[in-house]
Image (spheres, coloured by chain):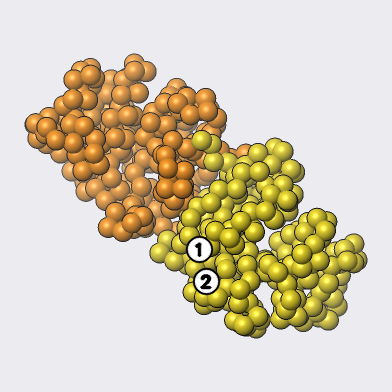
Chain colours: A orange, B yellow
């Protein structure tokens, strides 16, 4: 399956690498591919230059956002929450129409420490994207864990934790759930329609504090029942 | 140990009953003890009349809020989030000074379905209480699970889930952690100072949606690490 992954940061790389490993044709989208490949310094989050990562994943294509999304099946939003709506507008509603959009982004405002949520409780980034692109089939998922665990759940406790999906369309949630299960996610919980993304996005405040308290991002939420 | 439990609802009853079972002298506080005992109908949440419950727990005292708190060691806030600050003001800062206050309340606004949070992300009910009563040692805990699991964790998966504490004072958190462990909580995670109550209170939006999705409140969060 052809899959577009928007974003070249830690989340984009982890998910793209894993999907390619599973045999998918993965196209990573970025604003300016030449600029992305030319960077020789770590990015703002401390990730090594994209070109170094790409040298180890030559089968993955890098192109401008609209080119990556064109012709793709699912589109993965692995952007920062602050950038997501702007980048999607560069791709355009017509290209995004009918597509399953796996939305991993969290609407974090990094101007405070720890970050706060720029939208919450009565709205969510998942809903904002769904409202802006009503013909796109938005499914929120994977936003509640570290990038390494998104891509390869077996790295922690044999993947014995929970993964949430939120979306208005059962068929789109099934497509995403199949991808998640192929990646190794064992307990995928359907929270309901896209408004339930408020719940998973609002896990970020405790996630950030657990990261500090446990001194590692390698933890996850399991819903015991 | 003498312990005051503020609130006669499901949370107050469950926690008070369990603490009495563990051998503590428990004083439940209510606005008007005569009125509470006189009620013969289920309360707004569908709980049976308090008098019925009390008949099975005759060793637990019922008194007005200030009388219950007077002379107590720890005070447990098992009130609704909307009522908490008003009730604490009836008890007064001098009576609450120096006390460990175990704050279980969540600042839920029940005028919407599902409820939203009246304070969140940049503040929390735990912090509001701590700011209003600077001489009281506030510890947020137990607010992330169903009342039955608060009181008796073994009812689900042999208690194999996580319980969070937030507070400014290590000694107060130790007092609460000992109480929690005596009740059966096995994995108590210290999130940090009272501002981290923002994290545990913001679990409520996904808790409410999981309750709907799973069709039972008998689930809990385990932090896998």
Q: Residues within 10 Å of mark 1 (few under 14, many from 20)?
A: some
User: Image height check: is B64 above or below B61?
Assistant: below
Residue A118 location, quadrant: bottom left
Q: Nearer the viewer, residue B72 or A197?
A: B72
| Residue B14 position within the rendered picture, expressed as x and y whole percent measured from the top left | 76, 58
Q: Which chain letter goes with mark 1?
A: B
Viewport quadrant of the N terminus of chain B: bottom right
Q: Is residue B53 left or right of residue B30?
A: right
Q: Is residue A207 visible in this depiction of the protein?
A: no
Residue A55, numbered label: none
Q: Residues within 10 Å of mark 2 (few under 14, many from 20)?
A: many
Q: Which chain letter goes with mark 2?
A: B
Q: Earlier in the sequence, mark 1 or mark 2?
A: 2
User: Image height check: is A9 above or below A154?
Assistant: below
Residue at 72 percent of width and 47 percent of height: B184
Q: Is residue B216 left or right of residue A45?
A: right
Q: How many marks do you count on the picture? A: 2
Give the label, 1 or 2, closer to the camera.
1
Residue A92 location, quadrant: top left
Tag 1 and tag 2, C-beta contact below 8 Å = yes
| Residue B200 position within the rendered picture, expressed as x and y whole percent measured from the top left | 52, 55
Residue at 73 percent of width and 51 percent of height: B183
Which residue position holds label 1? B168
Q: Nearer the viewer, residue B159 or B216?
A: B159
| Residue B28 position within the rendered picture, expressed as x and y whole percent measured from the top left | 77, 71
Residue B130, numbered label: 2
């Amino acid at each position: 399956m052809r899959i577009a992954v928007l974003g070249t940061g830690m989340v984009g790389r982890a998910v793209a690498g894993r999907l390619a490993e599973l045999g998918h044709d993965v196209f990573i989208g970025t604003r300016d591919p030449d600029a992305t490949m030319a960077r020789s310094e770590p990015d703002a989050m401390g990730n090594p230059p994209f070109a170094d990562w790409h040298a180890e994943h030559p089968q993955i294509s890098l192109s401008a956002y609209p080119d990556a999304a064109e012709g793709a099946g699912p589109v993965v939003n692995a952007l920062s929450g602050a950038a997501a709506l702007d980048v999607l507008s560069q791709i355009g509603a017509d290209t995004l129409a009918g597509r399953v959009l796996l939305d991993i982004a969290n609407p974090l405002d990094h101007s405070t420490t720890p970050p706060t949520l720029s939208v919450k409780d009565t709205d969510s980034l998942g809903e904002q994207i769904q409202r802006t692109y009503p013909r796109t089939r938005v499914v929120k998922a994977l936003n509640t864990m570290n990038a390494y665990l998104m891509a390869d759940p077996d790295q922690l406790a044999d993947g014995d934790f929970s993964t949430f999906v939120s979306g208005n369309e059962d068929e789109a949630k099934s497509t995403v759930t199949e991808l998640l299960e192929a990646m190794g996610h064992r307990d995928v919980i359907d929270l309901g329609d896209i408004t339930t993304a408020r719940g998973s996005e609002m896990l970020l405040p405790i996630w950030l504090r657990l990261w500090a308290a446990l001194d590692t991002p390698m933890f996850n939420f399991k819903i015991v029942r």
